[in-house]
Image (spheres, rainbow, N blue to C red):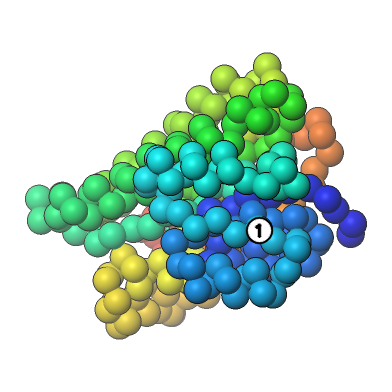
Amino acid sequence: MMNNRIVLITGATSGIGLATTRLFAQHSFRLICCGRREKRLNELKDTYGSQCHTLHFDVSDSKEVFTAIDRLPTEFSKIDILINNAGNAHGLDSAESSSLEDWNAMIDSNIKGLMYVTKAVMSSMINRKSGHIINLGSIAGKEVYPKGSVYCATKFAVDAFTKGLRLDLNPYGIKVSAIHPGLVETEFSLVRFKGDQQKAKNVYHGIQPLIAQDIAQCILFMVTQPKHVNIADLVILPTDQASSVIINRQ
Ligand code: 8X3
C-alpha cells in the first residue's frame, strides 16, 4: 500500500509503540518516532532511514515536548496522525501503601505527557482542518481494579480527555479516537513491578495474552478508514479476559 501520511508516535521504542512503528513502516507511512531511549531511536533511524525522523524527549517535560515538535523539519512538520502511546504503570499497590513517587510518575506521563504532546501537535491539524489523534487508554480506563487506583485514574483521565477533545475538535474535521487494550504481554508488567521478572510473568500465566502486534493491527485499521468514518472507541481484550478481574486461567 502506498502511503505518504506522517505519523508521530510516542513511546516508539518498545511494546505497542514499537510494533506500531514497524507495521506502519511496512505500510509506507512516514514516521516521527519519539522516545526517551536515544540508542533505540537511533536503531529505528538506521532501519528506516529517510522514512523516519526521531525525536528524543520525555513527554512529561512540557518544554522538551514543545521545543522538539516546534523544531520539526518542514518535511515532517505536517503531522496527519498522532498516536499518544507513551505511558506506564508504576507499582501495583493499595492506595495507602503506594508511593507518591509512583503516583507522580504515572500522572506525569500518562496524563500530563499525553496532553502536552496533543497540545503541541493539534494547532497544525486545526490550521489544516484535518488530522487524527489516537490515544492509548486501557481496560483500566473503563473499570477500576484493586491496587490500581492511580493507574486506573490516569487511564480514566485519558478516556475523558479523548471524549472532550472529540467535542472541541469536531468543528475542524479532526478525528479523535481511543483504543483500550486489556492484557498485552510487553515490558509493561516488568516496568510496573520494577524489574521483577517473576511477578511480571505471573500476570500472563495460564492465559494467552494479546501481543503488541495485535494492537498495532487495530491502530492500522483505525487509520485506514474512509474520511467520514471515525473509530471513536475500541476495547480489545484477550479472549481469556472478560474484565479487569475476570480472567480464565488454565
Ligand atoms: C494495561 C492493562 O489490565 O494491566 O493497561 O491495567 S491492565
Q: Secondary structure at mark 1?
A: strand
Q: Amino acid at mark 1?
A: His
Q: Is residue 219 visible?
A: no
Q: Tell me where residue 227 sits by quadrant.
A: top right
* Image label count: 1
Disc 1 crowd rating (10 Å Cα; few below 14, some 14-19, many 20+) is many
State the residue at coordinates (45%, 54%).
57
Image coordinates for residue 226, horizontal then vertical, percent: 84, 38
| Residue furthest left as drawn | 96
Image coordinates for residue 81, horizontal then vertical, percent: 68, 43
Vertical comparison of 144 with 42: above or below: above
State the residue at coordinates (53%, 72%).
40
Please give left or right for residue 122 compared with residue 217 in the image. Answer: left
Vertical comparison of 221 with 232: above or below: below
Please give left or right for residue 69 compared with residue 206 in the image. Answer: right
Image coordinates for residue 142, horizontal then vertical, percent: 43, 43
Can you say which quadrant of the picture contains the C terminus? bottom left
Q: Is residue 18 visible?
A: yes
Q: Is mark 1 within 8 Å of ligand 1?
A: no
| Residue furthest right as drawn | 2
State the residue at coordinates (28%, 52%).
105
Nearer to me, 8 or 249? 8
Please give left or right for residue 50 compared with residue 92 in the image. Answer: right
Image coordinates for residue 36, horizontal then vertical, percent: 44, 61
State the residue at coordinates (65%, 21%).
170
Can you say which quadrant of the picture contains the N terminus? bottom right
Vertical comparison of 34 with 171: above or below: below
Judging by the rendered image, the residue that carries numbered circle 1 is: 53
Q: Tell me where residue 189 sits by quadrant.
A: bottom left
Nearer to me, 79 or 188? 79
